[in-house]
Amino acid sequence: MTIATLPTANRWLRLMRLDRPIGTYLLLWPTYWALWFASAGSPSLANLLIFTLGVVVMRAAGCVINDYADRHVDGAVERTKNRPLVTGEITPRQALALFFSLLVLALILVLMTNSMTIALSVGGLILAASYPFLKRITHLPQLGLGAAWAWVVPMAFAAETQELPGALWFIFAAIIVWTIAFDTYYAMVDREDDLKIGIKSTAILFGRHDLLIIALLQLATLVLLLMAGISFGRGVLYFLGLGAAAAYFISQNRQARSRHSEGCFKAFLNNHRVGMVIFIGLALDYFLQP
C-alpha cells in the first residue's frame, strides 16, 4: 500500500485540497472550540457562518501557497508527486492568482465582523503565508503551522466579545502543541524523502524519540485544555470529552509504533476524531450547564 494516489478530482480542487477535507476538519474543530468558549456556548449565527466559511477559504489558500513554495521539491516525494503544480496542470502564476483571490474572499468575510477582529486578521494572514517557507530554515515549521491555526482563538473572542481574556491563551497554546503533535505524524510519512531533498521537520528533529515527544505534546494539549475548562467554569461533560481525546491519543501512538507510513498517516487522520469529541463534550456541557 502507498499513500500516493493517482489524481481523480478536478485540478483546482486538488490544488486547494478540497477533495481531501481532513485539513479543513482539523482547523474547523478548534475554531468551534474557540467560538463556543468565547460565546459561553451560544455563538452568533453570523459569526458561526463567517468563521466556518473562513476556515474553508483559508485552509484552501494555505494549501495553494504551500504547493507553490514546494513546487520544486514535491516531485521528489512519493506522496506529493502528482500534485497539479508538479505535473504542470496548473502554472505557478495561476496558483498565485488563485491564492490572492482566496485572500480577497477571506477579507470580505472578516470585514463582516468588527474592527478588532479585522486588526487581528493581519497577524493570521502573516502566519499562514509564511508557514510554507519555514521548512527551509527551521526544523520547527509545525510550530509556525500551529501558531497560524491557533490565531483563530483571539479572533473568535474578538468577534464575539471584543475582549481578549487571559484564559484564551490556554486554548491558543493547546492548539499549537496539538498541531505540532499531529503534524509530526504527518511529517513522519515523508521523513525519508525529506531527508534526501533537505526539507526540515519535527519528524527529523525528534528522530528516534518522535513517538515519546508526540505523547508528551499530546499530554500537554490535554493539560492546557483542562486548564481552559477550569478557567471557563466547564463541567463534567467537557472533561469527559478530554478523556475520550486521551483514549484516541493512546490509540494513535499504537498505530504509529512501527513508524511505517500507513500507520503514521492513520494516526494523523485520527486527530479529526480528537477535535470532534472535544467539541462535542464542550457543546453538550454548555447546552446542559449554561
Image: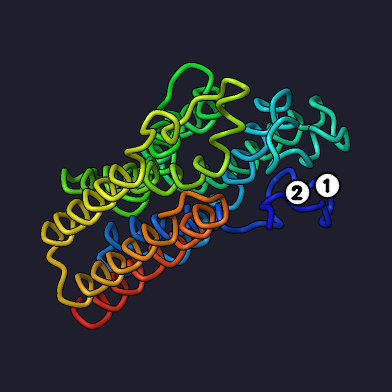
Q: Secondary structure at mark 2?
A: helix
Quick check: 262 above or below 72? below
Residue neighbourhood size for the residue with mark 1, other residues' Cα within 10 Å, grouped as few (<14), some (14–19), many (≥20): some
| Mark carried by residue 11 | 1
State the image coordinates of residue 279 (x, y, percent, origin top left).
35, 67
* Left or right, 183 with reference to 181: right
* Residue lying farthest to the right in this orientation: 89
Q: Is residue 158 visible?
A: no
Q: Is residue 20 visible?
A: yes
Which residue is at 36% across, 71% downward? 277
Quarter of the image for the N terminus: give it: bottom right
Q: Secondary structure at mark 1?
A: helix
* Residue lying farthest to the front in this orientation: 258
Q: Amino acid at mark 1?
A: Arg
Residue neighbourhood size for the residue with mark 2, other residues' Cα within 10 Å, grouped as few (<14), some (14–19), many (≥20): some
Q: According to the image, label 2 marks what residue? A: 14
Q: What is the distance, in whole Å, between disc 1 and disc 2 at their CAs? A: 5 Å
State the image coordinates of residue 76 (x, y, percent, origin top left).
72, 30
Which residue is at 76% across, 51% downward? 13
Foreground of the two, 77 or 61? 77
How many numbered circles does the render carry? Answer: 2
* Left or right, 197 with reference to 154: right
Foreground of the two, 58 or 24? 24
* Left or right, 177 with reference to 64: left
Q: Tell me where residue 120 sits by quadrant.
A: top left
* Residue lying farthest to the bottom in this orientation: 288
